[in-house]
Every structure is written in C-alpha cells, then in structure tokens.
Image (tube, rainbow, N blue to C red):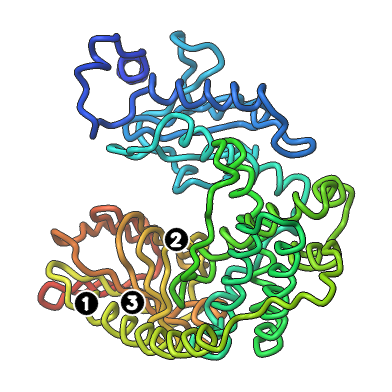
C-alpha cells in the first residue's frame, strides 16, 4: 500500500510538460512544478538582495500545500510520513494537506519551526508575488527564533474598544498623516506630517486600554515588518499601501500590517540604521522609534483642516453604528444557514482555543465570536477541529475566549455528522470537521446534533 501511495505522490509531483502547462486553464490547481517555480524565485530573490540583517529565506524550512500534496523543502529531519522525491533532490512529499499546514503561517513540523503556505487554485498572483508571500512566512520563522517578543496577544483583539467613535476618528486622522508623510516629496514635509500622525496616535492611545495599544504595536512589529520584507521581495516597496480612507472600523489587525510597513518605510527615510538597532536589541515600538528619529519641523505645522476633522468624526460615528449592525446580521445569518447543525455544550471544565485564524474572526456579542476559517478547541475531554467552515463560540467567562468556552455551534452542514463510539471515546466527523471526546453524550433533535460534555 505504501508503495502505491509513493507512486501516486510521484505522479502528482512530476513537473508538467510545456504542452501541459500551455493547455492548463487559468483556474488550475497549482502543480508541483508551480510550487518549484515559486521556491526557485524565493532563492533568486534572496540571492539578489539582503532583505533584512541576518535573514536568509533559503535557510528556512518550508512546507507548501498545493491542493493535492504537501511539499517539504530544506527540512533537516522530515517526519517519517513524508516521502523523498526522486524527481527533485531535497524535497519530500505528503499526500494531501499535512496537519501542520492550516494557513500561511509558521508551524512546528517534526519538531522544527517551518514556514507553511497554501497555494490556492485559481490564484491570479504571479510567481514573484507568491514567492514574496513565502518570504513573508519565512521571515516570521526568523522573527520567532530571533525576536520571540515581536508579537501581540491576539486575545486583546476580542476586548478592543471598537465601539469608541472618538478613538476611531483620531485613527482616521492618524492615517491621513501617515499617508501624506509617505507621499511627501520633501523630507521636511514628510517629517511634519509624520509628527502629526504620531500626535493623533498619542491622543488615541490615551483613550484606550494599555493592552489595546500594545496589541497594535506588537502586530506592527510582527506582521508589519513581515509585510515590509514581503514588499521588498516583490519590488513594490514604493507603492502606496495604506489607504487614505483608512480601514473598516473592525479591521484593526489588517490595518497594523499596513501601518507597520508604513512606519518601517518612514524609518528608512529618517533613521537608516533602524533595522540594525532592532537586531542589536532595541525594544522600541516602530512609532516610538520614528518619533525619536524625526528632525525638528520648525514653525511649520501640519494638521487636519476643520472640514477633515468634521468628516472624520461623522464617518467614525456612522462606521461604529454600521459595525454593530453588521455583527448582528452576521450572527443572525450564521444561525439561519440551511442544513445540519452541530452544537457542543460543555458542562464541566471548559475547552480552550488551541488554534484559530485571527484574520478570520469577528466578535458578534459580549461573549460570542464567529470564526470563519479555522478553529481548534481542546481540553481534558478531547478536541474538535474545524477548517474552512464557519463556527460560533460562546465564552465561559467575561472574556469571549480567554476564560475558556462553554458552547460551540456549527451550521450549514450538508449531511448528518457521523458518530462512532469505541473504547469510551466518541468520534464525530463531517465535512471539514473532526472531533474526539471522552464522556460525551450525543442526541439528535430534528437536524441538530447535540454533544454534551460532562
């Protein structure tokens, strides 16, 4: 059986002929040849220019899922379930998606921190853009190994003051200052608008919990700098990346990708040795480092015009109201999805998140969070893992996730989940869902499967 499996893997992994590549439609699933082209481009980019002091993506283990198999590169000790490919030296393959690859993110694979990526079918991005994305994830591995404190507590996002319209108004003015600073031709004008942006940020942070400000700054160091390195790799470092109209009220994490990259670009202009200082141990957040590097602007003052102030305040009030309304609609639509529903009710020790995608979550109530891509919960009773499917969690305490979870709801299942019991364990499987618990009591009511944990 293993021999047949290896042969099947090799058939998928062999490079396509030129004729096959020409005949393939644009919405094809990426082949092994496509993956090889991306990795080769990563190597070319790394050989061409130093992207960050001490960082070389060619030294980072890499796992890429192309829709058919997971291909492993540069790994010092591939797990035994991976098969060495004769068609490509130093490459190992696993049929299907390996459990360690759940997103574009670093992950432990065989005890080694590895950059993982998922090349989606039908992607329109070119080889260079895909290679830059891989470098983004490889840089995250570098960050974790060299700078484990560059990051944010993702749980802070669930208690972030999204409903503060005044803080949102100041955020919009801060964005205006950063955009104008980045676009300014003269260094004096850039410094003036950068100083204005930092002034608006200081006013905003004075209204917010310290944890919320730390969340933004940590994400700017982590994701913002990875986005900056990605832009250098893709040779689009000079393009606009922070929209003048700012991000939506709830897109705090997405915004930090862009503001971190913007702050890094401004530091290139005003503090050329800033990257070396960070590598030497400087612990300053990017905005603080920029504030220290800005030269005096003299009598020149840069600030929003009265009309811009009014517009920012009015937009913020409308956006906060729309955010609350949208969350209510998301929850309502989720619960109304046709098909089978699975409800997991925890009566004893709560389950805790063991993995979730922070880019694809939405707080829809004081204790409720809607997960739209990936979620894994676990505890003493067992685990449940959901991928590429919506699910709703309810917190056991004041924090929607931090104090554990009492309830999980999954809707829109095409068919009844399969339930099997053996040796005191209950296994539940359905499309994109797998769970295993001890001490579970399963009942059915109409098209709802209820799992109760003692």
Residue wearing tag 3: 452
Closer to the camera, 423 or 89? Answer: 89
Q: Residue at x 38, y 19 (%)?
A: 33
Image depth: mark 1 or mark 2 in front? 1
**Separation (CA) of disc 1 from disc 2:** 22 Å
For numbered disc 3, what is the local secondary structure?
strand
Image depth: mark 1 or mark 3 in front? 1
For numbered disc 2, what is the local secondary structure?
strand
Q: Residue 251: percent from the left, percent from the top?
A: 47, 70
The quarter of the image holding the C terminus is bottom left
**Separation (CA) of disc 3 from disc 2:** 17 Å
Q: Earlier in the sequence, mark 1 or mark 2?
A: 1
Q: Residue 238: percent from the left, percent from the top?
A: 59, 45
Q: Residue at x 64, y 43 (%)?
A: 229
Q: Residue 21: percent from the left, percent from the top?
A: 27, 17
Q: Residue 258: percent from the left, percent from the top?
A: 56, 59
Q: Are marks 3 and 2 in contact (CB under 8 Å)?
A: no
Closer to the camera, 225 or 242? Answer: 242
Q: Earlier in the sequence, mark 1 or mark 3?
A: 1
From the viewer's perspective, tell me whether residue 76 is left or right of residue 86.
right
**Separation (CA) of disc 1 from disc 3:** 25 Å
Q: Quadrant of residue 434?
A: bottom left
Residue wearing tag 1: 333
Disc number at residue 376?
A: 2
Closer to the camera, 115 or 383? Answer: 115
Q: Earlier in the sequence, mark 3 or mark 2?
A: 2
Can residue 361 be spotted in the picture? yes
Q: Residue at x 60, y 57 (%)?
A: 183
* Mark 1 neighbour class, 10 Å CA radius: few under 14, some 14 to 19, many 20 or more: few
For numbered disc 1, what is the local secondary structure?
helix
**Residue with the most extreme front position:** 299
Closer to the camera, 235 or 338? Answer: 235
């Amino acid at each position: 059986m293993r021999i047949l499996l290896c042969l099947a893997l090799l058939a998928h992994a062999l490079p396509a002929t030129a004729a096959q590549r020409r005949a393939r439609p644009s919405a094809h699933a990426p082949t092994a040849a496509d993956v090889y082209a991306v990795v080769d481009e990563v190597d070319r980019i790394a050989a061409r220019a130093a992207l960050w002091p001490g960082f070389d993506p060619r030294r980072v283990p890499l796992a890429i899922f192309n829709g058919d198999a997971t291909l492993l590169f540069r790994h010092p000790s591939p797990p035994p379930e991976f098969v060495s490919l004769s068609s490509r030296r130093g490459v190992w393959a696993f049929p299907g998606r390996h459990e360690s690859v759940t997103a574009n993110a670093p992950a432990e694979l065989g005890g080694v921190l590895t950059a993982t990526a998922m090349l989606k079918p039908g992607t329109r991005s070119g080889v260079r853009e895909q290679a830059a994305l891989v470098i983004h994830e490889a840089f995250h591995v570098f960050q974790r190994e060299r700078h484990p404190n560059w990051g944010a507590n993702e749980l802070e996002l669930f208690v972030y003051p999204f409903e503060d319209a005044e803080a949102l108004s100041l955020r919009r003015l801060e964005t205006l200052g950063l955009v104008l600073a980045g676009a300014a031709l003269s260094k004096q004008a850039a410094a003036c608008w950068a100083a204005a942006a930092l002034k608006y940020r200081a006013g905003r942070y004075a209204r917010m919990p310290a944890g919320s400000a730390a969340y933004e700054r940590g994400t700017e160091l982590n994701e913002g700098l990875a986005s900056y390195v990605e832009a250098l790799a893709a040779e689009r470092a000079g393009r606009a990346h922070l929209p003048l109209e700012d991000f939506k009220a709830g897109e705090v994490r997405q915004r930090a990708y862009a503001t971190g990259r913007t702050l890094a670009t401004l530091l290139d202009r005003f503090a050329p040795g800033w990257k070396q200082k960070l590598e030497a141990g400087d612990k300053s957040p990017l905005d603080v480092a920029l504030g220290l590097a800005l030269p005096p602007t003299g009598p020149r003052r840069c600030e929003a015009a009265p009309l811009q102030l009014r517009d920012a305040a009015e937009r913020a009030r409308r956006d906060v109201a729309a955010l609350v309304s949208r969350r209510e609609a998301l929850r309502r639509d989720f619960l109304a999805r046709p098909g089978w529903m699975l409800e997991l009710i925890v009566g004893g020790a709560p389950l805790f998140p063991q993995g979730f995608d922070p880019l694809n979550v939405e707080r829809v109530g004081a204790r409720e969070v809607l997960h739209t891509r990936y979620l894994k919960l676990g505890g003493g009773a067992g685990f449940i893992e959901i991928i590429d499917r919506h699910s709703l969690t309810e917190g056991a305490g004041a924090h929607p996730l931090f104090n554990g979870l009492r309830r999980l709801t999954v809707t829109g299942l095409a068919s009844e989940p399969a339930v099997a019991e053996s040796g005191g364990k209950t296994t539940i499987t359905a499309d994109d869902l797998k769970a295993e618990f001890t001490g579970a009591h399963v009942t059915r009511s109409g098209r709802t499967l209820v799992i109760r944990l003692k």
